[in-house]
Structures are given as structure tokens and as C-alpha cells.
Amino acid sequence: DQQVKQNSPSLSVQEGRISILNCDYTNSMFDYFLWYKKYPAEGPTFLISISSIKDKNEDGRFTVFLNKSAKHLSLHIVPSQPGDSAVYFCAANVIQGAQKLVFGQGTRLTINP
Amino acid sequence: EPEVTQTPSHQVTQMGQEVILRCVPISNHLYFYWYRQILGQKVEFLVSFYNNEISEKSEIFDDQFSVERPDGSNFTLKIRSTKLEDSAMYFCASSVSRSNQPQHFGDGTRLSIL
């Protein structure tokens, strides 16, 4: 099941610079997208979401961009901080359908001092 | 900030034994979920639960699995006769509604089947 894909297993960014994490999806019925952050031995922590009626949502240092025609979303973190080092998961679902989230494989982000 | 709590954090069980994983969702949430993540694989949906009944289940969620909300606060996942391939992290999640609301996850139970 490859409905949500994160093609970069890892990303390394200098502290203070921008981190950009990418996610692609294939199911055109998805209309709600989320990013979660996960530290080892913890559960996924919700970061930010976007519904398909928008193309951008911002919350502090985190911005999510949605390109529906390309079936692509990205998470921008700026400026990146050492505490942002974690695994980031993209997830999607259909608001009026089943409530199951479909997850990507995750991208491990490392912020270097 | 309210959070989803799961117990135990680690459960070791012999193959063929029954196991019950417990979750306390966030108190005003109405929708409850179980997911699992086998080591090195994606987080996968198992089941969603609303108004005391299953609203959706995946093909993984076969007759060996059941869920229950026994007392209005706990939400449990039971695996009747565990198999080696049930070894995984099991995450409970809850959400306040089904529309445009994120699911919030617990820290998981690591289930190890010997």
C-alpha cells in the first residue's frame, strides 16, 4: 500500500536553516493531511494539518504547503532547531470517509549544530 | 495538555496466549483508534471505534482481535491467541470528532511475542 510516500528516509540540516520535508500521495480522495513528529520510545505527536480547501497553513516555525494538482505536500521548518531532530510522518485521510490515517514511511530529520 | 495514556509500555507474551492492551483516551474525545507499527515498517491502521461500536477495521483486524470500551474511560485491544507476527508497537489514538480534527496518539505498547 503506497498511497502516501515519503521518498527521503533521512535529511540532515544545519541549525538555523530551513528544513523541507516532502510527501506524495496517490489517492485523489484524500482531503485532510497531517504531519506528525516522533521521538524514540514515544508516540507520534501531532504538528500541523491542512485540508484540501487550502494550499498553505502556518503555525509558528512550521508551515505546510499542499499542491493538489501534483498530489504533493511539504513541511517547512524555519529556523530549524536541535530539538526538531526526530522522525517526521506525513499522513492523510478522507474527512467524510473512514477515519483511518494512512501514513508515509517517515523521514528522519537531523539538525546539526 | 491532556494526553492519551497507554499501559503497559512493554508486554512480553508467549505465543498462543491472550493479551490485552489498555488505553485511556483524552476525556472529551469521541473517536478511538488502534494502529500498529511493525519494526521497520509503516504505521498501519487497525480499527476505529465510535459510539460503542467498530466503525471501520482493516484486513489485519481479523477474528483474533477485539476492542472494547468497558467503563467509559478505558479503551482496550485484545488479541486472543497471539502469533509471532503480532510483535509490534501498538498505538492508541483518539480524536474529538471526525471532521478536520487530528488524531492524538499515546506512547504505545511494545508487544513482544516469544
Image: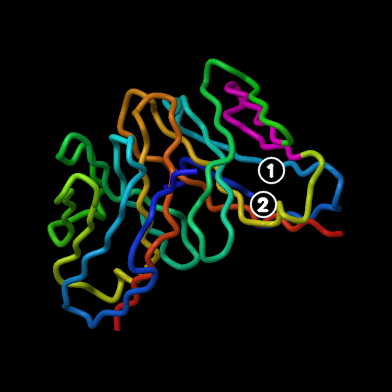
Callout 1 crowding tier (Cα within 10 Å): few <14, some 14–19, many ≥20 = many
Asked which quadrant contains residue A64, the reply is top right
> In this rendering, is residue A80 above or below A29?
below
| Colour convention of the picture | rainbow
Where does the image place residue A32, in percent across and percent down from the top left? 47, 28
**Secondary structure beneath disc 2?**
loop
Q: Is residue A65 magenta?
A: yes
Residue for badge 2: A8
Q: Amino acid at mark 1?
A: Leu
Name the residue rendered at 55%, 42% in the picture.
A90
Horizontal relation, residue B16 to residue B85: left or right: left
Q: Main secondary structure of the magenta part?
A: strand
Looking at marks 2 and 1 on the same chain, the residue that comes earlier in the sequence is marked by 2
Horizontal relation, residue A15 to residue B42: left or right: right
Horizontal relation, residue A25 to residue A72: left or right: left
Where does the image place residue B16, in percent across and percent down from the top left? 16, 78
Q: Amino acid at mark 2?
A: Ser
Quarter that holds the C terminus of chain A = bottom right
Most distant residue in the top direction: A53
Q: Chain of mark 2?
A: A
Where does the image place residue A7, in percent across and percent down from the top left? 63, 49
CB of mark 2 within 8 Å of CB of mark 1? yes
> In this rendering, is residue A110 above or below B103?
below
Q: Is residue B19 magenta?
A: no
Q: Separation of disc 2 and disc 1 at Cα?
A: 8 Å
Name the residue rendered at 30%, 78% in the picture.
B113
Q: Which residues are magenta?
A: A62-77
Name the residue rendered at 37%, 73% in the picture.
B10
Residue for badge 1: A21
Callout 2 crowding tier (Cα within 10 Å): few <14, some 14–19, many ≥20 = some
